[in-house]
Image (cartoon, rainbow, N blue to C red):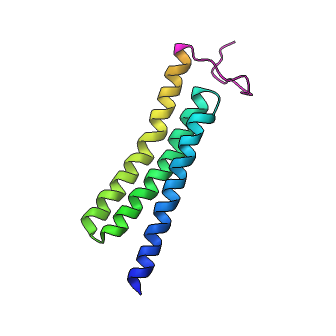
């Protein structure tokens, strides 16, 4: 009985992680400018990869692999938003313009 519950939990985590990765991919293709694309890639991609790593850690049924998976999730949570922020600032300074649909430009120094 426990194996069935474990398989169900792992399957649900895999499906949810895959769905978030799909949403991130659609956001990268469909969103209007580099800034919103980066937002979609960093947020939904981090959640999706975190859920997939959690599924791997649970499915492995071993503490060392579970700890490695948790370390990977922590790494994604700490680095993805920071790197997206730094890339967006660099893109802004390089001259990439905001979409016409953008409401505010907080970095505009006028």
Residue displayed at 65% across by 14% down:
109
Q: State the residue in front, 76 or 48.
A: 48
Magenta-drawn stretch contains 35: no
106 up-or-down from 68: above or below: above
Instruction: State whether residue 98 is above or below residue 16.
Output: above
Q: Position of residue 31 (x, y in %)?
A: 63, 33
Q: Nearer the viewer, residue 15 or 85?
A: 15
Asked if residue 13 lies left or right of residue 105, the reply is left
Q: Nearer the viewer, residue 110 or 32?
A: 32
Residue 96 is left or right of residue 78, and the answer is: right
The picture places residue 18, in percent across and down from the top left corner, at 49, 54
Point out the residue furthest to the left here.
Answer: 64
Return the residue nearer the eye: 29 or 106: 29
Q: Magenta span covers which residues?
A: 94-110
Could you tell me which residue is drawn at 49 percent across and 45 percent down? 45
Identify the residue at image location x=37%, y=47%.
75
Where residue 82 appears, x then y in whole percent?
46, 36
**Residue 71 higher or lower than 57, as above or below:** above
**Which residue is painted at 42% across and 57% down in the image?**
52
Quadrant for the N terminus in the image: bottom left
Q: Picture quarter containing residue 30?
A: top right
Judge whether residue 99 is colored magenta: yes
């Amino acid at each position: 009985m426990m194996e069935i519950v474990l398989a169900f939990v792992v399957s649900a985590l895999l499906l949810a992680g895959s769905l978030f990765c799909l949403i991130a991919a659609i956001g990268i293709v469909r969103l209007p400018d580099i800034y919103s694309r980066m937002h979609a890639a960093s947020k939904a991609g981090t959640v999706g990869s975190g859920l997939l790593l959690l599924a791997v850690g649970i499915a492995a049924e071993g503490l060392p692999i579970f700890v490695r998976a948790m370390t990977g999730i922590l790494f994604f949570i700490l680095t993805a938003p920071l790197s997206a922020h730094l890339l967006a600032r660099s893109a802004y300074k390089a001259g990439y313009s905001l979409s016409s649909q953008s409401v505010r430009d907080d970095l505009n120094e006028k």
